Amino acid sequence: MIVVKDLVRQFKSGDRTIKPVNGVSFELDKGSLASIVGKSGSGKSTLLSLLGALDKPTSGDVVVDGVSLAGLPDGKLTEYRRRDIGFVFQQFNLIPNLSAVDNVMLPMEFSGIRKAARLQRAKELLEQVQLDPEKHSRRTNRLSGGEQQRVAIARALANEPKLILADEPTGNLDEQTGGHIIELLSSLSRDHNTTILVVTHDRSLAQKTQRCFRLQQGRLTEEVRTGSRR
Amino acid sequence: MSVLARSVGNAFRNKIRTAAVVAVLALAIGLALAMLVANQAVGAKIQELNASVGTTLTVNPAGGQGFEGGGEPLTTAEAETAASVANVTSVVGTKALRVQTATTATSNSDSATGATQQTGPGGGFGPAGQQATVTTNLTAAVDAGTLGNRNNASGNTGSQATRTLPITATGIGAEVDSTGKALEITNGTGLGDYTASEAKALMGTSLAEKNGLTVGSTFTIQDKTFTVAGIFDAGTTFGNNAVYVTLPEAQTLAETPDELSTMIVTVNSMENVDSTKTAVQDALGTDKADVTQGQRNLETAVNSLDSVKNISMIAFIAALATAGIIILLIMVMLVRERRREIGVLKAIGARNRTIGLQFVLESLVLVALGSVVGAVIASLASGGIASALVSSNTTTTAATTQRGGGLAGTTPNGTVPGGGMPGGGLSGDGQGGPFGGASQLLTSVTANVSPGVLAAGIAAVFTVAIIGALVPALLTARIRPIEVLRGE
């Protein structure tokens, strides 16, 4: 379970203080698929970076399965990202000179998993995200956008994280490919019982998630749904 | 994929840039290695020069120098006095003998009208009154030739058309030649105890060949039979027309049991030569002995080589530092270029040390490639660089050194041709004195790229590269994982 408590992140910009995240609180159940929508610059990515321990909040806390991130040293936050978080980015952020399978193996290498085991798991994950096996050994900079995003999702799943944070995962993809990616995330959330939080400005994509939050001027509100979309 | 494999892959990510970086690194590393090789070569040359001449002082009787003067002979007691002086490591006494073929000795003696015939140690003429003429069944390996007969004509009233030259015979107190340089025995053994009287001799190669003698053969001096214990090669025709016996044996043959022709005093280091020379002179007395310092000119040459050695070491360090700075700048550039990628690695759980190690290894891959090419450059260039450094720094010294060489030999009594008369009383060797070849020595520095020097140089390069790469590697720790979201 993910619990976010009164999260604030503020920056100084000259004489002004900017609060892209201003007192955000919400809870997500294990295995849920949720989305955060908002305009560009509304603080979506900042909120995501706080949840993923890429950045530290000015105040407030994120509690993952009872473990508070507030006050954790950098080493522990690294461990948290490695063990509990999977990231999927709009621009994929794969290592371009590594193959698809090598990219997926990276988080497992950082976790100290033996090579044979991580190779096997990487191949399984790439099959799960439906990447053509012939492309497993291909460098990721020679894959299409949709294929790269599949590799990125496989990489996010590598260490069986508790939470997958996806920042505009379909932003660089055409509508059809984007739809496939969302279906993929949805099925993975179901199959792996992994909590997935998708940040997007695409309302149609947000409609496909169980819960949808709107971030506006740093404040989060949940849109009420009549039923589950899963 | 391991960190190492990823680092190797990253090093070749941009092949054109990698080639350019390796080329620049190779030049710096090649220069560093070439300078190290030159440094080692010059260092070896300095050792060789020191070893070839040594830190020796030569002691002659006061007032006796070459053919000139008189005075009292040196004694074994004075050798003991010299040995007790501070910084003196050894004193070797020599006793020069003039050995004439039996029939020639008789005729020369007749024609010389009673003049004392003198030979200096090692072939040159020594101080007056120090040499005893003894006879032998050996025939000299050097023909008189024009010089021998001219010298004879100028120094004698005799009218022999041709003469048989004398043989240089020296009693020595250690296995060194009359200049203090170790004898190079090419066949057989040394004489063992050089302080004991024993009927054994070391014979020069040309003299042995001329007389058909080998190790174990016998010959006579003053009717006493000597066995050839070893054959030595002095490196010169004149030097090889010589016989060495033990010091007591020579003193017995000359019937001057307590006398020495010269003493070779070895000092513990070149820095102490000047002070020790003064101390020995004071200990023996200026009225008893003349102490000469043969290596003064060579010291100038060695100082010059020392400066070359220092220059090459400075250049080595500078080239090494350049390689380190190149690595530093390249890796800083790469870290800046890959901030986002580093952010990604951190976002997916990479530790700072893992990322830092990856960048250090990547730099070492570049350095390894640069070292291979640099080693090739060094092997091709080090000889030329060493020669250029030496020749540009020793031209003046070499000229000075040549002027400081031994004087051309003259023969008042005309019996011994060819041998030079060094100003310091050291023996002539037919090449203008013992230091006459210093200029050749200086300009013949051979820079060999030995595996040991190469390994040491490359180890230094890698050490500097690691230091150079550590700074950018530490910079990666400062990059925050949120960089990954920059531009999203």
Image (cartoon, rainbow, N blue to C red):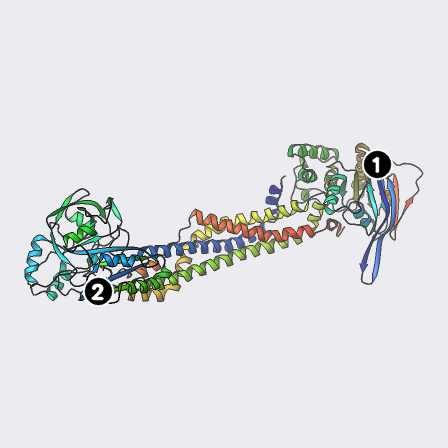
Judging depth in this view, the residue of B158 and B486 nearest the camera is B158
**Residue type of the residue flagged with mark 2:** Ala
Checking the image for residue A87, the label placed there is none
Element carrying mark 1 = loop
Label 2 close to label 1 by CB (< 8 Å): no
Question: In the rendered view, would you say B448 is above or below B158?
Answer: above
Q: Quadrant of the N terminus of chain B?
A: top right
Task: Check the residue under mark 1 and report the chain it is in.
Answer: A
Checking the image for residue B408, the label placed there is 2
Spot occupied by residue B420 in the image (x, y as percentages of width and height): 21, 62
User: Badge 1 is on which residue?
Assistant: A30
Q: Is residue B356 visible?
A: yes
From the viewer's perspective, is B395 left or right of B234? right
From the viewer's perspective, is B279 left or right of A87? left
Spot occupied by residue A33 in the image (x, y as percentages of width and height): 84, 38
From the viewer's perspective, is B189 left or right of A149? left
Discs 2 and 1 share one subunit: no
**Structural crowding at the residue carrying mark 1, measured as other residues with C-alpha within 10 Å and reported as few (<14), some (14–19) or many (≥20):** some
Judging depth in this view, the residue of B151 and A104 nearest the camera is B151
Task: Check the residue under mark 2 and report the chain it is in.
Answer: B
**Residue type of the residue flagged with mark 1:** Lys
Judging depth in this view, the residue of A130 and B279 nearest the camera is B279
